[in-house]
Each structure stands twice: as C-alpha cells, then as structure tokens.
Image (cartoon, rainbow, N blue to C red):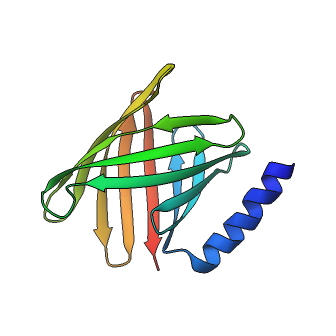
Amino acid sequence: MKHVLIVLVMLCTQILHAQSAGYEMRTNGKSYIAVTFKGIELRHRTDDLENRFTYRHNFWKNTSKLYLSVPLHYKIEKNEPTLEPRLIYKFSKFKLWVQKEFWYNSNKNGAIAIDYPYKDFTYRVGWDTSNTFRFRLKYKF
C-alpha cells in the first residue's frame, strides 16, 4: 500500500509538470499509463499494481537516421531492474524500432514497432515475442 501511495503522489506531480502522457494497451490484457518528464518516465500497469521508473539515454540521435536508445527500467514492486536497448531507424514520416529486454539473470521479450507522430500525438503499433500486439497513443504537451 505504501508503494501505491508513493506512486500516486508522484503520478499526480508528474502529470502537472509532464512533457508527455500516454496510454498503451496490449492483446495479452496488459495496459499502461505513462508520463514523461525530462527523460524520466513513470509507467503504471493498470491491470495489475505494477509501477516502473525509466531513465532513457539516446546515442547518435542528432547525427544519424539510425540511433540507439538505452532505457534502464526499475520495477518497484518486483525490485527488479531491466535493460531494453532499442535500435531505431528514422524514416521521413515514422520511426521503426526493434528492442530486446534482458537483465544479467534473465532473457525476456523482444519487440518490433512503428511510431507514427502526427502533430502533438504519437501512435504506436507493434508486436513482441510473447505473440502480443501493442497499441499506444502518446500526447506531447
């Protein structure tokens, strides 16, 4: 209960000052609400009380159409960090990315998706190796 209260307070604080907010749903029944502020994302899994902090750093983003995005996630309830390196290719109207989730003691899902920005929104359609499709809508403030 303590963790839930902390996350709710942080979520409210982040929404008031967030740079973007999004909602993602997946065909395996999982769904997520996320807010981002200056490279830090707070994500809450709505079907289960799971919360995650993410810090992301991009390499070569300003100099190349192909760049590497390296997020470090921390799942609060599981006390589990994960790393999900993502290789992104910027086409003229959308981004195509592939990623692999792992940590030193586990090997998890891989994913592929397309992010399509339109005005202040970004739409995502993707698939991961658990045979799950994902759909995301993100709004940039």
Q: Quarter of the image holding residue 138?
A: bottom left
Across and down, in percent, residue 6 comes to: 78, 58
Give the residue drawn at x 53%, y 50%.
25
**Residue 118 to residue 72: above or below:** below
Q: Quarter of the image holding residue 118?
A: bottom left
**Residue 127 to residue 116: above or below:** above
- Which residue is nearer to you in this view: 29 or 89? 89
Across and down, in percent, residue 8 comes to: 75, 62
Tell whether 36 sits left or right of 50: left
Give the residue drawn at x 58%, y 43%.
74
Across and down, in percent, residue 99 comes to: 33, 38
- Which residue is nearer to you in this view: 25 or 2? 2
Tell whether 101 sits left or right of 53: left
Count of labels in the image: 0
Across and down, in percent, residue 44 comes to: 64, 53
Give the residue drawn at x 29%, y 62%.
116
**Residue 121 to residue 3: above or below:** below
Tell whether 114 sits left or right of 18: left
Tell whether 69 sits left or right of 31: left
Residue lying at the far right of the rendered structure: 1
Give the residue drawn at x 51%, y 19%.
105
- Which residue is nearer to you in this view: 88 or 127? 88
